[in-house]
Amino acid sequence: MLILFGIPYVDAPMEAEAECASLLTRQLVDGIVTDDSDVFLFGGSRIYRNMFNESKYVECYLLADLEREIGLDRDKLVRLAYLLGSDYTEGLPGVGPVAGRELLEEFPGKHGLERFRDWWDRVQSGKDSEQETNTSWKRRFVRPPLSLSALALAASS
């Protein structure tokens, strides 16, 4: 059909979203038509959704709007996808959008997820220090130390 109408097209060698994001980055296209939101992870910055929906209502999403309105740039979106899951990763059990965003805020930056993993390993093995578990968010995941009465009760049973 595209050939019949003289519309140029590209066959993506791998992931279509990656190819479309590359075309957009090189300013060879004005936007990407897709209903797959992982296109932002590949660098898509202007996305048109519902193009072929019967409601005839097309939505346009801009990466700049995501960053300005909810503080999610491409790097944070990629890290959030690691936590929530995507086409390429299962994500962490029990971590949803809210906990994922909180985790990104608690462990910011390029190596934030690595710092989270290291901290979580220490928490799980009981080797975390009070100094490194110093925020209310982190304290939610740490078992409180046993009180003296709990120790006495445990010793008597």
Image (cartoon, rainbow, N blue to C red):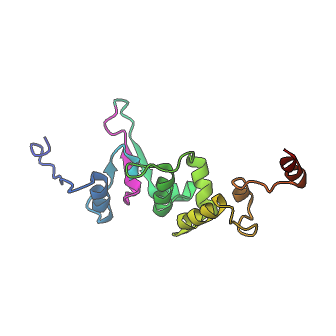
- Residue 44 at x, y = what percent? 37, 57
Q: Nearer the viewer, residue 133 or 45?
A: 133
For the N terminus, the quadrant is top left
Horizontal side of residue 129 vs 11, given as left or right? right
Residue at x-position 68% and y-position 66%? 127
- Against 145, residue 111 (above or below) is below
> Is residue 101 in the magenta section?
no
> Is residue 47 in the magenta section?
yes
Residue at x-position 42% and y-position 52%? 89
Horizontal side of residue 8 vs 28, given as left or right? left
Give the main secondary structure, helix, strand or loop, of the magenta stretch: loop
Question: Which of the 4 quarters of the picture holds residue 132?
Answer: bottom right
- Residue 45 at x, y = what percent? 40, 57
How many callouts does the rendering have?
0
Residue range of the region highlighted in magenta in the rendering: 39-53
- Residue 13 at x, y = what percent? 20, 57
- Residue 113 at x, y = what percent? 54, 63
For the C terminus, the quadrant is top right
- Residue, far left: 4
Horizontal side of residue 142 vs 55, given as left or right? right
Q: Nearer the viewer, residue 111 or 19?
A: 111
Q: Nearer the viewer, residue 51 or 144?
A: 144
